[in-house]
Image (spheres, helix red, strand yellow):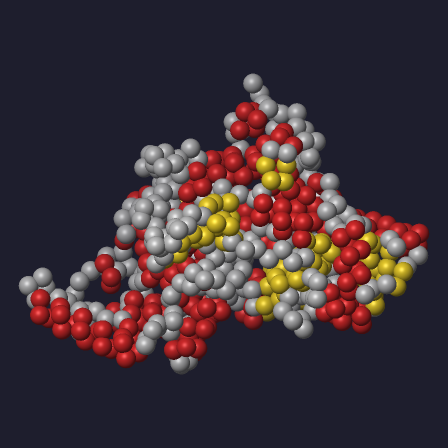
Amino acid sequence: MMGNLLEHMGIDRDRIHFSWISSAEATKFVDVVREISEKVRALGPNKKFVKDYTK
Amino acid sequence: MDTCIEKIRAIGADLLAKGTVEKVIGFADGSIPMATRPIALTSDKEVDKLVFNSVCGLNLANYVSKNSLSSKEGKIAVVAKGCDARNLVTHIVENQISREQIYIIGVPCTGMVDKRKIAALFDDEITGFEEHGDTLTITSASKTETVKKADVLRHNCRVCTHSNPPVYDVMAGDPVEEQTLDHPYEDVDQIAAMDLDARWAYFENLTKNCIRCYACRNACPLCYCPTCFVDESSPQWVGKGQNEIDVTTFHFLRAFHCAGRCTDCGACVEACPMGINVRDFTRKLNKDALELFGWEAGLVLDKRPPLDAYSPNDPNDFIK
Amino acid sequence: MNFITIDKKDWAPGIDKSRKTFRVYGPVEDENGCQIKPLAPDTAPKMDAPVTVMSAKSVLFPQTEKILTATLDESKQDHHVMTPVETDDMPRVVLGIRPYDAKAVQLVKLNFDNPDYQDPYWCAAYEATTFVGLGVTHPGPCDFSTAVGCGPFSEEGLDVLMADMDDKYLAKILTKKGENWVAACGFDTEADPKESQVLFDVLRKEAEKQIQTDLATDKLAGKTILDLYDAPFWDDVAFSCINCGTCTYVCPTCWCFDIQDETRHNTAVRFRNWDTCMSSLFTHHASGHNPRGTKVHRVRQRFMHKLKYFLDKYDQGIMCVGCGRCVASCPVNIDIREVCNRMNDYETTK
């Protein structure tokens, strides 16, 4: 529901990720983080929900 | 419309006179047109102060929670519309109060009016407000307007499908007919139809005049946390200024804390001095709670809220 | 030149002309109602606006104000040293404010600009600001300004007071600042001083007659703080209060603030934000103790400050100009007029 609300507010679904990873699943953790990083890198810098201190 | 007020007063007087309850919490007339104020009565001699009309827009469940009740207090009667009663049920389910502590005087509700919509009919300030049945007569220095109550109902009342209290000790009137809606979440769908950037812009615009007075939070019966996350200082989760991201963070997270709990009573919008429709946040969650879990908050005493319990059938396709 | 008339046809062009030397604020309407805001180029102030939800205090005292910054970059010589931010001291004019909002500025001034302490940010903004008020010809049901030493045509704190005469404004120039603004707009149609004053007096009396309120403050000064503090009615007053900050934020005379530091990467910023005595955080000590731990404490504090402590400290009346915004905006209709009368009428039985 949180992901849905964020998406409803205009946050790209690809920036939100939920996974179950056990403490024993080191390789899964690495794979998931790699996958997310690649997705987010492809999307470019996020402009929403980012505080601008220059203002 | 029979506002049930005579019955409410009689019930209240009887409860107080017999000592069944220590207090009756209801609405009293306000000092300006279209205003009412929550009031607690302790004597049956005072029940004439009670009123019930179309401007009782706050939620009285807000006045009975762990924070506001001491355990020493006896039973308390609450005048409850459909939504107030649902929030009392939510309080009981969330262990804020016990069923035995509360005496619910149920009122079949015909909806509350949108004061801003009425104010918008005038260029000057409203000096008088009268209600006769389903007709409202509103006056200002320059003119008098007569409107049908149905035309100026608050949005949450227009889409309400639980006008009658689902749980009560006594009803102050005959139940009103509940409506069924073909598109209960049209407002949510309208936002969902926009593209991502338009949605973000929509919510940015929605909260642009927020002054962070927290009236929405404090009018909400669900917001009974002893310390709200925005008031925490170690660690401090959110900036306290008017930065729009901090403002949005407050609204987003407060709404999420109401996920699966909100009864759409509209007290948040009613309380907002800026008239911000903060329900745009909670309505999405209510829609999801209904679609994903078949859940509407505050209807039954013997079921746990969806985010409070685990079921193997819970939708989990969001976990990747 | 004390009085001028301004043809409404010349109003917007005149304002535009003044933009060379003035930043212009005025009532602006959007979906959340009317507010005093900076006027975007080519927009005219909404002069027939109803009472703005918020007062004009934010022009001098913004809800969030950046006051100091520092760099945390240790390679820089001045790292961790707070330095004032550049402020824009360009003269500014606030158009169409209600007279009580100008009087409120004078009350706030007692706090921000006094022999013991001069707040540099507030004082600089005050110096730079010209207040052009518009008399209130139809005061609303919440207005009780006449009961607290102000009124719909009060001149206190204003630089120019205008009256709406259908196709034109009649303006009374009250100060040098007012003269400068009038000159910058190019308004120069002189009006007969005697006749104009008569007109103002008629309008003032008409408007004052419409304010019906039985507020009494005469006995507040004679009571002791402790008697009022211990009065039995506070639980009753506070019952319905939900402890939001609405009353204090909409109030033109509430001046309390909080200082917050925020850092991100190598930038540190110190902000000043409005604070509210309605919040439990307002008096929450680092030890965890809170001397105003319940809402009854906080509600009492608000009214005692406005109606008693301020009166005793400054001897300038109560800290209220009767705008009625707190009455209109309070979600639970706590009415300062009723509370004031209860305090005023309270006789201790001791």
Res. B318 visible in picture: no
Placement of B65 over or under C115, stated as above or below = below
Q: Taking C228 as reference, is C106 left or right?
A: right
Residue drawn at x 70%, y 63% as measured from the top left: C21
Label tally: 0
Q: Which quadrant would the C terminus of chain C be assigned to in this image?
A: top right
**Residue C300 image position (x, y, % from top left):** 52, 36
Residue drawn at x 90%, y 60% as measured from the top left: C190
**Residue C26 image position (x, y, % from top left):** 67, 62
Q: Which quadrant would the N terminus of chain C be assigned to in this image?
A: bottom right
**Observer-nearest residue: B17 or B80?**
B80
**Residue A43 image position (x, y, % from top left):** 30, 78
Residue drawn at x 82%, y 57% as measured from the top left: C171
Residue B77 position by quadrant = top left
Residue drawn at x 24%, y 61% as measured from the top left: B307
Res. C12 visible in picture: yes
Residue C138 position by quadrant = bottom right
